Image (cartoon, rainbow, N blue to C red):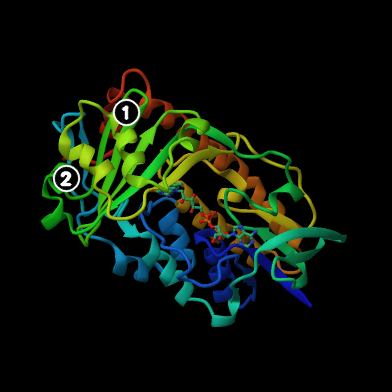
């Protein structure tokens, strides 16, 4: 069977592309490895930026739905030292520039905006074989196959589509997060809730830090960041969370108990999130009938909070390029990639710089300078 447009991956980027095409009457099929929309907890808060994520949702005609899921007050930010002393604090703003939303809610509004048969769940792409003339044969782990005239890799960090365009693989960025979740912090983890404040807490010193968000429900979600090689984390046996998190806490010796509790008092199993990135200027030569968006195109560390915003923006702009070039997929891909490469290189460079600035030998001074520059005046 042939599908004219095949999008691999139902992340925020792939969904936005399908939605923009849908509202312009162009059908696309998304093939997603996960078996259902609820196969995996989506976790995490995302701030949706005025200059990319919000524009994407406007192009997808979902801006009003975005307004409906904004978590009031969650964009408050606080920088602490390791003793819990507040060094800088910004209360929440109402200017709409970077409102925070739950990632799962954002994904839900995108999923609900598409016809039910747009997404083929349980379709993990295992191979994409060029057939000539820009067409590809897609093979899936469930044994099914499909041909397509336009193949879009929206399949994230370890994209199966990327090798058709580029030999480059993501490299370890030198830092990993261990994610913990503490429920009902207002009643069960009051000291930690107090130190995190209403939105995001950042407590960093050279080579390590604790980054935590308070969700509207009172849940505290923490990324414990440590600048160590990957094999150091491989030795941390997360199947024994109590011992593993005690070892991790040892790395934060002397930190305030309410900060340490964010490491040791998790209510769920901790999750290791090694940070990888593609080279800042990652690009490829045009290949007929195939392109990439989002992390598949420009995986970067999360230190500018741009990855999800860019994925949606890529999806929207690719959709608009396809709409603007009826009958010529190549013209659409040329127009899309011409803007994609400089846009992602600029953000990847910023993110790369932030990664060093967060945890360098002057930390937390670099972070304070950065946020003083970007955040609105009190
Ligand atoms: C710890 C952390 C914190 C972050 N915080 C932020 C933040 O605050 N703000 C922000 O903007 N960004 C943030 N990011 C980055 C953001 O999560 C990503 O950039 C974004 O999710 C990329 O979207 P995507 O659609 O390109 O890919 P993904 O969200 O990775 O989606 C890819 C989809 O493809 C599917 N898939 C993968 N392989 C296959 C296959 N072979 N066949 C079929 N389907 C497949 C996957 O199951 C998935 O559903 C963070 C990242 C991390 C790791």
- Quarter assignment of residue 34: bottom right
Residue 95, horizontal then vertical, whole percent: 24, 53
Between 143 and 13, the one lying in front of the other is 143
Give the labeled residue for mark 1: 251
Mark 2 nearby-residue class (10 Å; few <14, some 14–19, many ≥20): many
Which secondary structure lies at badge 1? loop
- Quarter assignment of residue 166: top right
Residue at x 64%, y 76% (from the top left corner): 27
Residue 320 vertical placement versus 267 (above, below)? below
Residue at x 16%, y 32% (from the top left corner): 256
- Find the residue positioned furthest to the right: 132
- Location of the N terminus by quadrant is bottom right
Give the labeled residue for mark 2: 192
Tags 2 and 1 touching, CB below 8 Å:
no
Say which mark, if any, is on residue 347.
none
Residue 264 vertical placement versus 57 (above, below)? above
Residue at x 37%, y 54% (from the top left corner): 48
Mark 1 nearby-residue class (10 Å; few <14, some 14–19, many ≥20): few
- Find the residue positioned furthest to the top: 361
Residue at x 37%, y 25% (from the top left corner): 207
Residue 340, horizontal then vertical, whole percent: 60, 47
């Amino acid at each position: 069977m042939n599908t004219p447009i095949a999008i691999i991956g139902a992340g925020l980027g792939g969904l936005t592309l399908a939605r923009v095409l849908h509202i312009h009457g162009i059908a696309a099929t998304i093939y997603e490895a996960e078996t259902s929309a609820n196969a995996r907890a989506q976790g995490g808060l995302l701030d949706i930026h005025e200059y990319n994520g919000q524009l994407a949702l406007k192009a997808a005609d979902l801006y009003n739905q975005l307004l409906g899921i904004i978590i009031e007050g969650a964009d408050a930010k606080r920088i602490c030292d390791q003793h819990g002393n507040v060094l800088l604090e910004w209360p929440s703003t109402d200017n709409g520039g970077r409102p925070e939303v739950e990632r799962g809610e954002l994904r839900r509004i995108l999923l609900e905006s598409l016809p039910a048969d747009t997404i083929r769940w349980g379709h993990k792409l295992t191979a994409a074989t060029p057939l000539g003339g820009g067409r590809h044969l897609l093979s899936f782990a469930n044994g099914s196959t499909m041909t397509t005239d336009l193949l879009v890799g929206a399949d994230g960090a370890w994209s199966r589509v990327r090798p058709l365009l580029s030999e480059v693989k993501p490299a370890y960025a030198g830092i990993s997060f261990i994610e913990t979740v503490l429920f009902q912090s207002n009643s069960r983890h009051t000291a930690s809730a107090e130190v995190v404040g209403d939105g995001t807490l950042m407590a960093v010193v050279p080579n390590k830090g604790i980054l935590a968000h308070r969700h509207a429900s009172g849940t505290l979600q923490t990324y414990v960041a440590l600048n160590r090689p990957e094999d150091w984390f491989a030795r941390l046996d997360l199947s024994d969370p109590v011992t593993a998190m005690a070892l991790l806490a040892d790395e934060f010796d002397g930190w305030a108990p309410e900060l340490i509790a964010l490491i040791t008092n998790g209510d769920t199993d901790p999750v290791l999130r090694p940070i990888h990135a593609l080279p800042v200027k990652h690009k490829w030569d045009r290949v007929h009938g195939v392109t990439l968006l989002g992390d598949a195109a420009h995986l970067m560390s999360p230190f500018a909070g741009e990855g999800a915003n860019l994925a949606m923006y890529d999806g929207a702009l690719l959709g608009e390029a396809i709409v603007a070039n009826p009958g010529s997929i190549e013209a659409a891909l040329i127009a899309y990639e011409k803007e994609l490469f400089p846009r992602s290189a600029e953000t990847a460079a910023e993110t790369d710089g932030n990664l060093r600035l967060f945890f360098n030998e002057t930390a937390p001074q670099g972070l304070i300078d950065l946020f003083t520059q970007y955040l609105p005046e009190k």
